[in-house]
Image: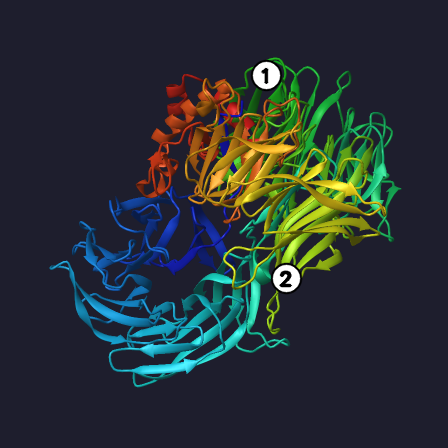
Amino acid sequence: MSVWNYVVTAHKPTNVTHSCVGNFTSSQELNLIIAKCTRIEINLLTPQGLQPMLDVPIYGRIATLELFRPHGEAQDFLFIATERYKFCVLQWDAETSELITRAMGDVSDRIGRPTDNGQIGIIDPDCRLIGLHLYDGLFKVIPFDNKGQLKEAFNIRLEELQVLDIKFLHGCSKPTIVVLYQDNKDARHVKTYEVALKDKDFIEGPWSQNNLDNGADLLIPVPPPFCGVLIIGEETIVYCSANVFRAIPIRPSITKAYGRVDADGSRYLLGDHAGLLHLLVITHEKEKVTGLKIELLGETSIASTISYLDNAFVFIGSSYGDSQLVKLNLHPDAKGTYVEVLDRYVNLGPIVDFCVVDLERQGQGQVVTCSGAYKDGSLRIVRNGIGINEQASVELQGIKGMWSLRSLTDDPFDTFLVVSFISETRILAMNIEDELEETEIEGFCSQVQTLFCHCAVFNQLVQVTSSSVRLVSSTTRELRQEWNAPSGYSINVATANATQVLLATGGGHLVYLEIGDGTLTQAKHAQLECEISCLDINPIGENPNYSQLAAVGMWTDISVRIFSLPDLNLITKEPLGGEIIPRSVLLCSFEGIAYLLCALGDGHLLNFLLNLSTGGLKDRKKVSLGTQPITLRTFSSKNTTHVFAASDRPTVIYSSNKKLLYSNVNLKEVSHMCPFNSAAFPDSLAIAKEGELSIGTIDDIQKLHIRSIPLGEHARRICHQEQSRTFSICSMKNQSNAEESEMHFIRLLDDQTFEFISTYPLDTFEYGCSILSCSFSDDSNVYYCVGTAYVLPEENEPTKGRILVFIVEDGKLQLIAEKETKGAVYSLNAFNGKLLAAINQKIQLYKWMLRDDGTRELQSECGHHGHILALYVQTRGDFIVVGDLMKSISLLIYKHEEGAIEERARDYNANWMSAVEILDDDIYLGAENNFNLFTVRKNSEGATDEERGRLEVVGEYHLGEFVNRFRHGSLVMRLPDSDVGQIPTVIFGTVNGVIGVIASLPHEQYLFLEKLQSNLRKVIKGVGGLSHEQWRSFNNEKKTVDAKNFLDGDLIESFLDLSRSRMDEISKAMEISVEELCKRVEELTRLH
């Protein structure tokens, strides 16, 4: 039963909805604060660029984000209002680097019609009040008292019902608003009102302006000395104040965003719907405005927000493409643009459609999305884990260890790759043709297995074998010094850095040597009570060549110990518990924090925080990375150090926001890895896996890897065809100059290169609405079927469309058959060897018939009326699940005997659907336009027809995201051995660029996690005092009810980021150990 569902985000929202700049984290620091609908990110401006400081979820969809500074404060506060009428004021706490809530509240009214044009939230420049326009005909005021605290809110009636924009004017003795509105004859005007806080009413303001540009929809208040307001229209820009009126014509455009450049308000950046960036300049003499000038600077992503940072740096936030950090240059480049893009921030939004495919044929799903819109449209290939891009490989069996060596201590590149086998050691080096070939280092002993190698100071190399430690010159390659193990003892494990060697022989002897110029000195020897299993002396303190600490893993008592160097005093002894010995230990430092990593023989990894001065260990955490022994190695990528854990599930360990993260590497088993940074293969890794040695570069270190294919047009539907190794998309291109501005195409792409290989243009006004790859009964071919609609300007609803059937021949789309329909073909499904289409309000079934002349055609077999608009259809066996424009979900069945489709059951609630999916035979999942998810159950056992005819709502949840598509599939390799291997998952894509996973859990696991979620709600408080319970409650115009049978995976998985003391608190309430809790929550993170 798929009743109990776990909803989790695999890719966070990336659509930037708001941004603002100010001194938030301190009075000296400049911050860029970005809102991505349900998250806020706080960045610091540094000479190196934007540095992220905090990224937190907000329990609401952000409607307003404004910085303001109350009287007497040294830094800015942040005001946030949400779409569900909650607000909060946040302040930065520099000590904890967290947000403190200064004020919070609810500004909803019992009655009132929510505004059509979205909420408006504004703050008086002199901090006397906050103004909100939430409901038609009402202006809500939250006044400040003289200490900067918020007082009781009240409403003022506003005569203007169709408000387009409201702003506060600068430089007015009483707080004054300017309102841009449309009257009932569709003319647009501007009016001003003074807000009388004592009387709680409006007073007619100092001026008004009638009959503006019909497209005017944005007000920009101008700060002192000029004051007044700019009114941005589609064909004119007007500057208006009590005594000045200036206007200039502009090229027709719709301005979407603006950013003020100077504090005095004389220059503004304007971004339009085509992604063009203009500079608007107010010309003036003696603080009097004399005119306006506008100049085109260049092109950016289509901006939803523009924030001028400093020194000509500008942040362009986008909802339709990638956000950008740009620099405005004084002089244009060769192409005539002043805009230079310095950085891009990937945005998957809006995900209009996607498909799940396994392109690499590795059993791991990848999601290919139709992302962005208009000119910023693209395809994005999203996969979990880190890819290794192989550059070279050679067959080698039985590798036991690998190390890279440099020929000079100061050489930037590695020269040698030492590969060790059971009874020999081979040395590979790059030759002049950039090929790996075998070479010799004469001083090395090559007839035995090497235990460890390292570069040492004074241009020397160290080799440790079971009988000796050899010190070799890296220039002459001759032996300079050798330390032999005492007779009767052999060296079992060893490690070294540039100046130190630590080794262990049988009998628990620990020997410490120091390396000089041609000398190896035994500095200390210690006898331990049991055998030693692994060692590490990686220097992470002040000196990069010398470690003051040694980590030692032990057999028998199964512990890890920290010794001081050079005197080998035992500082810390940490028993690991259990029966499994430590196989690999590593001292490492991430983001300036020292850790000890300890890998066990059963694939578990422990990490501890390490105190470098005392050698103490604390905050032990345990994760499972696989089932085989792990070996740990550090490597660096983009100047940051990471750790590679080689095992049956190779993993990269890295740190982000001071948290350790684990990302799987897209390789099967890896036995050994070492960094190999040669001139021919910079920043590469050498990897030993089943019988081969390969050298490759590593992707960016992050959990999800995203590859972008810019299209320059808007892809709206996508489908993959395994047999022809192609994708097909329905796309739309905007011609900027032609009379007919939109063109629609069906395009065919190669599924490896993503190049267009064939295009079929649709007719004028014809849109591609649906696409499917399928085959028909009695026909072995596989076809692409496309459903279209003729969208004519004079029609409310399309009355005509087509179904086109294509075959891919020699990489070309060949049209085989077409069928005209009496409406838009919103959905196509393969159905028992036939084609099921949703056409306007009707479900229609077509057979694939052979004509006498050998050609084929679609022939209508039967249909079902009774929908408002059948937009989304899924099928399973003979069952058809329909998502309607406004009548929720209904269930139809196809009857073979009668050749008819009948309605079996329906949900009688009024939900405006945005996507549906079948979870199992009885449970259907829906998403609707108030950002909710719900599940309904088919009631086959009902006693009466009435009960059987009702789809019962069993689960409800507020996702806070608009879902465009569900698809069955998984983003991760499904390993049958893991607990989550058998859990069915559905992936969804949303307007904000979220990729999420819905996993159907067994009941006992659901109950356990439900208890954990309710305990986490008590410990983790929402930013701004917003309630998690209220946020996740199902909410539409008619009702608000608590979430049921859905769990918030993002909240549950945030357990892993809690401090140890908070984990203990939850572990007590759950009556289960912290280790067990971590293990169970970590298993869930493997779902995405």
Judge whether residue 325 can be spotted in this image. yes
Residue 503 occupies which quadrant of the picture? top right
Eyeballing the image, is 676 above or below 451? below
Q: Nearer the viewer, residue 253 or 520?
A: 253
Name the quadrant of the N terminus: top right
Q: How many marks?
A: 2
Amino acid, disc 1: Ile
Residue 712, numbered label: 2
- Left or right? Give the position of 1067 relative to 302: left
Q: Nearer the viewer, residue 588 or 140?
A: 140
Name the quadrant of the C terminus: top right
Eyeballing the image, is 553 above or below 930? above
Amino acid, disc 2: Gly
Disc nearest the viewer among 2 and 1 = 2
Picture colour scheme: rainbow
Q: Secondary structure at mark 2?
A: loop
Tag 1 residue: 558
- Left or right? Give the position of 436 relative to 281: right
Eyeballing the image, is 195 above or below 488? below
Residue that appears at 80% across and 35% down: 778
Residue that appears at 42% across and 67% down: 258
Q: Residues within 10 Å of mark 1 (few under 14, many from 20)?
A: many
